[in-house]
């Protein structure tokens, strides 16, 4: 990966973190953070992809879909029961 691409990803990540912190501050205090008097701190979430549901426009912590961990637990439980069935048949032979 190119150094400029890494720096761009790092800047975008930091902007996303700052916007979440500014949003929490606004919810807690009712004050919006202004930059140089007129501009209000914010982040355009239209280009953000959720790591949970892979839809655009929100972060994973704001996602209403069930998390991937729940799906992984269900799949591993199902795979575990299949593994037990295979091993019991192997002992019979």
Image: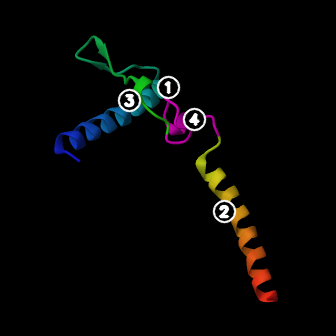
Q: Does residue 65 appear to the left or right of 27 in the view shown?
A: right
Of the numbered discs 2 and 4, the one sitting upstream in the chain is 4
Q: Are marks 3 and 2 in contact (CB under 8 Å)?
A: no
**Percent position (x, y) of residue 12?**
31, 34
Q: In the image, is residue 32 part of the stretch drawn in magenta?
A: no
Of the numbered discs 3 and 2, the one sitting upstream in the chain is 3
Q: Residues within 10 Å of mark 4 (few under 14, many from 20)?
A: some
Q: Dot 1 corresponds to which residue?
A: 27
For discs 4 and 3, the disc positioned in front in the rendered view = 4
Q: Dot 4 corresponds to which residue?
A: 63
**Percent position (x, y) of residue 4?**
18, 40
Q: Dot 2 corresponds to which residue?
A: 76
Of the numbered discs 4 and 1, the one sitting upstream in the chain is 1
Q: Residue at x 40, y 27 (%)?
A: 47
The residues colored magenta run 51-65
Q: CA distance from mark 4 to mark 1?
A: 18 Å
Q: Residues within 10 Å of mark 1 (few under 14, many from 20)?
A: few
Where residue 37 sits, quadrant-wise, is top left
Of the numbered discs 4 and 3, the one sitting upstream in the chain is 3
Q: Are marks 3 and 1 in contact (CB under 8 Å)?
A: no
In what element is the residue under mark 3?
helix
Where residue 22 sits, quadrant-wise, is top left
Q: Nearer the viewer, residue 12 or 54?
A: 54
Of the numbered discs 1 and 2, the one sitting upstream in the chain is 1
Q: Residue at x 74, y 80 (%)?
A: 87
- In the image, farthest residue toward the right: 92
């Amino acid at each position: 990966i190119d150094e400029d691409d890494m720096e761009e990803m790092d800047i975008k990540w930091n902007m996303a973190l700052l916007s979440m912190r500014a949003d929490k501050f606004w919810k807690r205090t009712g004050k919006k953070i202004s930059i140089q008097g007129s501009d209000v701190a914010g982040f355009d979430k239209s280009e953000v992809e959720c790591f949970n549901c892979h839809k655009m426009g929100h972060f994973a912590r704001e996602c209403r879909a069930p998390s991937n961990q729940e799906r992984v637990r269900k799949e591993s439980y199902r795979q575990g029961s299949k593994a037990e069935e295979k091993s019991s048949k192997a002992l019979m032979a």
